[in-house]
Image: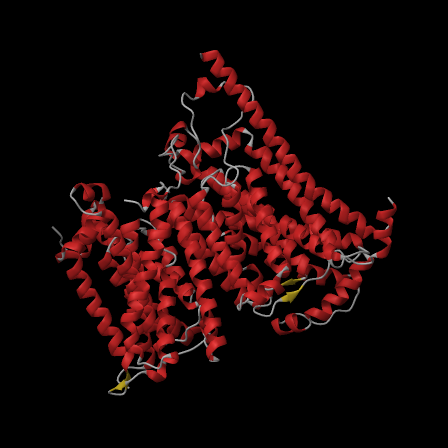
Amino acid sequence: MDIDMVLFWIMVAIWVFMPAFIVYEEIKERRALKELLKAEASEEG
Amino acid sequence: MEMLAVIGSGVAAITGMNRLIVDIAMYFGLFVIVAMALNFQYGNAGIPNFGCAVQVIVGGFTVSGITLRLAYWLVQKAGVKLLPYQTAYDWLYNSQLNVVTVNNFLKNHPLVGVSLLLFSIAVAMVLGAIIGWVISVPAIRLRATYLMITLITMADASQIFGRNIPYICGGTLGIWIPNVFAWYPGDRGVITAVVTLAIGLVCFFIFRTMLNSPYGRLMRAIRENEVTCSSVGKNVVGIRRNILMFASAITAIPGVMTAYYYSYVVDAMYQRAYWTYWSWLMLILGGPGNNAGTFLGCALVIAMRRVIIVYKWFFDKILFFPISYFEQILLGVLLIVVMIFRPDGLIPEKLLYIPGVNYTKLVREKVKVDWRTAPKMRLAGKRRRFSLKFWRR
Amino acid sequence: MILPAIWMAAIVYACEITILSIGFTLTYLTAKIPNFAHGTYAGWGIYVTYTMTKILGLNPYLSFPVSFLVGGAIGVIVYILVIGVLGKMGGGAIVLTISTLAIQIFLTATLYIYAFWIRDIYRTYTMQFMLKDWDFRLWGMQGIFYVALAICIVTVILLHTFLTKTRLGVSMRAVAEDPELASVLGIDVYRTQLYSWFLTGGLAALAGSMYPMWFQATPGSGALIITTIMAGSLLGGMESVYGAIVGGFGVGLSEILLTKWLQGIFGIWVGEYRPLIPMFFLIAVLLIQPRGLQGAYEWLTKSKRGIELLSRLGIKVE
């Protein structure tokens, strides 16, 4: 197959992978933070 | 799968819509590296670096000043005849033909091309670190606005040097760069974009690791309250210098890749307005302090610019002036609007998540980090939203 | 010619930079930020003069008061729309400075658009022009030489009287020092800020109006002067108006005269590095004595090391 197309799709993959990874990490961290704060709030009160 | 084969077989070079995507990807890759480094410096360390143009310029000058000469020397050692290039006049005048010869040579020796690319990236990083050291000299004594003034003038000065010394990048005429990807049978733009994006991915992971580590916490602590940190015993000056040097080294890489993308280096490509203001707009739009915001800001700004360029014919009909000024107006207006209505950026900086740390032991009240008042958190916890009360008195 | 042309050019340039530096220092005193858009006010002054001279056919000197008003209006609009709002919202110095940068970009772009529009409508060149032909000549020297000097001296005297004797000037200085205390004393802080922004904008546009009479002007020349303005203001100490006078004059003179002198020594290629001279001043001042000449003067007369140095040189100070 034409090598251009291969690289093209690799580029698109990188271009999509980076934001997806970031979003995944952010959601994971925010969820963990929320649970942590909720656990502390319930422990305090 | 046959769709892919049909697409693959029918197109010999990237044209049309695909070219636009490649272009967008390339610019995205470049600016994402610059914006992430800027986020590292400002969002996390509180150093407003408005001179990032000079860091990018260093990368471009490396390619045109050093790599080019190295390529010529290598090619001559391998026995290929090159036109003379010793004096400045010949350097410029014969550059195009010399570059064609070098390209032919590189097509048969792919290793030389790849090693040239790696060499220029390495040297650019070293030179970028040196520039970072030079920048950190005023950053030690000056704060906030004085630092901004100094850095902006440094960026202007570097552009003037580049414009007037022909040995660096051909003065006002510019100089041609050999195509280090000549061995690649396909389109040059695609592989440059892929390499840039790959470097961007690597940088992203590097930055992410640094930001989530104790070093990242140290940076944020310095941003908030320097005096406390230095009283605890941290070498604040040395850490700022390290941060600047590291971020400068990374920012030099987009300069290198721009040079290879266009195969041409001229000082007007590295204008202050282009690399500094757009990068800052991306940073502020997305929200300084976290990488997600930087990405989002980059994506939005690049999409906006490319859309404007693609629909240029439409804009030319309703507006009577060149598009670049419209873009600049948009830049200025967006900057102000973002700072008034969404000062935290689109993705605000969140509270630090450190696994295994009990927050109530560390911090008693809920503190919202407000980057606008960094390095001093005067309004910690309460931030006034934009309201019309200012005009109703 | 009584004076060689280069000296006349240097003096005219220095007068304009002095007025601009004074405005810049005033802005720094009242708003605590360096106003990067200050040079662009001057750019607007250039184009108001240009419009009135080439398009409407009037004497360029008649456009000076008009450009003062236009510059003041722009300053007031900038304050109302941007700086005031951001300041009220608790923005720090960095935010306000970034916003002045954004305003500079915006105003320069609108200037370019205006130039293009005029060119489209009136079919005349708008991008690089000089209005020397509309000037009068007195005793063999060009009129702007006298006018620039006169305006500079009159402005300095008027400003001094205004800031020290009139109620509005004194309240401006009070607001600059401590806004909360001033509002306790009954001064309307908002209106005083409006007046000060009007004044600085107007002064800058006035200086810009004088610019195309001697030098070539483009839509971007307002933005290019900003380095010189900042160098002049910083040289005098950003907190002192009298320092700005000395600093602005010094930087303006030295930019042109030093270039000429260095060109005599090294060759004509030094001319390209002319913008580097104010940058050099800027960086030198910021690294050696960030408070400029005012700070140096205070250091010399008040601190111990300074007094020792002076007494060693033979100057006694109480």
- The percent position of residue B197, horizontal first and vertical second, equals 68, 46
Tell me if residue A2 can be seen. Answer: no
Asked if residue C66 lies left or right of residue B154, the reply is left
| Quadrant of the frame with the N terminus of chain B | top right
- The percent position of residue C69, horizontal first and vertical second, equals 29, 66
- The percent position of residue B132, horizontal first and vertical second, equals 51, 48
Above/below status of A10 relative to B100: above
Which residue shows up at 39% across the image and 61% down it?
C227
| Quadrant of the frame with the C terminus of chain B | top left
Above/below status of B363 relative to B387: above
The chosen color scheme is secondary structure
Above/below status of B211 relative to B153: above
Asked if residue B106 lies left or right of residue B231, the reply is right
Tell me if residue C41 can be seen. Answer: yes
- The percent position of residue C168, horizontal first and vertical second, equals 17, 55
Which of C87/B193 is in front? C87
For the image, the number of numbered tags is: 0
Asked if residue B86 lies left or right of residue B79, the reply is left
Which residue shows up at 48% across the image and 80% down it?
C123
Which residue shows up at 34% across the image and 45% down it?
C87
Which of C227/B241 is in front? C227
Asked if residue C91 lies left or right of residue C160, the reply is right
Which of C159/B49 is in front? C159
